[in-house]
Structures are given as structure tokens and as C-alpha cells.
Amino acid sequence: MQELIPNRKIIHVDMDAFYASVEQMDNPLLRGKPIAVGGSENRGVVAAASYEARKFGVRSAISGVMAKKNCPELIFVRPRFDRYKEISSKIQKIFYEYTDLVEPLSLDEAYLDVTNNKKGNPSATLLAQEIRQRIFNEVGLTASAGISVNKFVAKIASDYNKPNGQKTVNPDEVISFLEELPIRKFYGVGKVTTEKMYQLGIFTGVELKSKTLEFLEKHFGKSGNFYYNVVRGIHNSEVKSDRITKSVAAEHTFDVNLSSEIFMIEKLEVIANALEKRLKRYNVAGKTITLKIKYSDFTQQTRSKTLPYFISDKGLILEIVKELLYQERMKDSVRLLGISLSNLNTEEKKFVVVQLKFDF
């Protein structure tokens, strides 16, 4: 069990339907309409959906076919990741005007530790309002925020008043907030774990809190300790301003399924080239190469090999990938191929954060 440390002041900022909102901002004809970024009505997977589309059950990670079935009026838009990165950089620049302790989780969300902030403002709630207003004024998009004593609670709170809202969970409200929270809303508790908890009679935080550490570890292994602590408001993870990249990947979904390894090699050469460019951008190399294969029936398979040395060259990567490709016969035609490099040569940089207690 972890020990409770003095309260931090953490803000979790989450952009509202980021990719879709950027597309609607840039193209007035898409505003107010149900749109999906990525995928198509014939194939592919949705990367993001506008709030108008979400009303019909369209969400990220579902197939384009299913999305169109749920919402016949859905408009598919090709993703423009360079544009999303450009907007994300503008937003992060705003964050750094308030604190150097910024931990981006993706292009559209980040944690900010404002315990000691550059504005000298003791109110994290007012800082979150100001940051959200600046994002709207300077970028043209809305953001939601959660404010609390640790990353776990702030992350959950940011989802409470979406879109374009925020929620503060004060130090003296954390326990009651978590006790009343439906277990499916606990960050890190996925669909499978939720069902398992339901079977064990755990539907809300208060029921989770009633279980002993031994009980939770018996049923959930190492995660049991995590659940035991977070429901008691204990989550000591710091906001890491220099987040370590654990893997770098590139993948592609094909318009026509591939059934021949020869055609797959051609595609993998292109993917390996894209991966090499990303590795150079991050200035990293890795030892573990993983080939990702998604078949036409949407089942997925990965094949990996770990080398005794670091590599980043596309030629070397491709040689290993070819070896993995021919490791066993394909069980079906292939709709997606991807290559990732992990076990990277990055070293974690540690820093000390002075913890103080303020009013929220």
C-alpha cells in the first residue's frame, strides 16, 4: 500500500472531439454535421467523431462500415495529422506559459502540475478557466478540464462536464467523489474488468473500497493494489514533463486486402521508411521489432523479435520484418500491416517536485 502524500494541484486538459473539431473549424461546411475522421463507409477504422456523430453511436475505433450503418448521414474526412500537430503545438505553448510541468498524453490532452505556477495564482480552478478561455480565443477550439489533487482524479473529472466545461474535485471531496463513482468511470478500468467487477458485486467506488487488498490482488493480480489505492484517493504518479517514448510505430490500412506476401513486402518497405523517419525525429533506436497483422476478419496478430543491439535503419528493420512475415503462413487476407520498435535506448530522467498544500 502506498502512503498518502501532500496534495498537488493537477489540471487535466482534454480537447473536445479534437480531430473532428479541427476539421469543422477549418471547413465551415462541416460545422453542425456528423463527421468521422478516418475510415470510410467501405473499410477502415474511425479515428475520431464529432459530437453530432456521437449521438448516433459513432466513436473512435469502430469500423467505418459500422459507423455508416449507425449514422447514414455521416461524412467521412481524411485525417490531416500535420494540421493536428500544428494546432496541438499552439495549445501546448499556452500550457507552458503556466507551468513547466506539462505531461502530454497525446495531441489532444495533457496533465499540468500547477502547484507552483508561473502566474503565482493559488487557484487551480481559476487557472483552468483561464487556460480554456485562452485556447478558445487563440486557437478557436473548446477544451474541458478536470482539477484535483492527483492525476487519476483530475483525469476522471475532465470528462464530467464535456464538452467545454470543467469540474474541480477539492481535497475534502475526493473520497466521497470516488465512493459515488460508477466503477466503469474509473480510469484504467476497461470493459472486461468492469464486467468482472460486476460479477464480484462491485458497481461503484464504495463497493470497491469495501474489498480487502488480498481480495483485489487475488482477483486482479498486480492491478489489485492499484484499485485498492486509487479508490482511497492515493495516486502518487508525478506529472512528468519529459515523458519517455516507449515505442515508435507506423502502420497502414489498405483499400484492398492483400493475399500475397510479395505485395505485403512492398507495403512494408513504405511502412519501414515512415518508421525510420519517426525514429530520426525522436532520435531513438530500439532492440525489439514487432510486426502487426490485422486480417480481413478484423482478428489481429503480432510477431516480435528482440536483438542484442539497437537499430533504427529501415534496411535492418525490414530484414527482421521479412523474417517475421515468413515465420508462419497467413491465415487470411490482410487489411492492415504495421511495424513498431520498442525496448528503446531512452533513459528516464527523474526530477524532484516540492509538494505544498494550497486551497483550491
Image: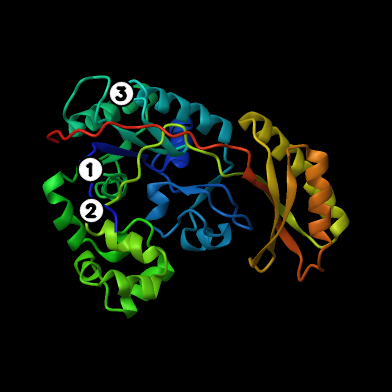
In this image, 233 relative to 194: left or right?
left
Distance from the alpha carbon under mark 3 to that under mark 2 = 25 Å
- Identify the residue position indicated by label 3 in the image: 98
Residue closest to the far right: 262
Q: Is residue 195 in view from this perspective? A: no
Q: Are marks 2 and 1 in contact (CB under 8 Å)?
A: yes
Residue visible at 23% across and 44% down in the picture: 5
Query: Can residue 238 be seen from the camera position used here?
Result: yes
* Residue visible at 39% across and 37% down in the picture: 110
- Percent of width and height locating residue 74: 49, 52
State how far apart marks 2 and 1 are (Cα): 8 Å
Q: Amino acid at mark 1?
A: Val
Quadrant position of the N terminus in the picture: bottom left
Q: Is residue 255 above or below residue 133?
A: below
Count the numbered circles shown.
3
Label 3 is placed on what type of residue? Tyr
- Label 2 sits on a secondary structure element that is loop
Please give the residue where the numbered disc 1 appears in the rendered image: 149
In the rendered image, residue 17, in percent from the top left (x then y), is placed at: 41, 43
Rounded to the nearest angstrom, the CA distance separating label 3 from label 1 is: 17 Å
- Quarter of the image for residue 294 reads bottom right
Q: Which residue is mark 2?
A: 233
* Position of residue 59 measured from the top left corner of the image (x, y, whole percent): 45, 55
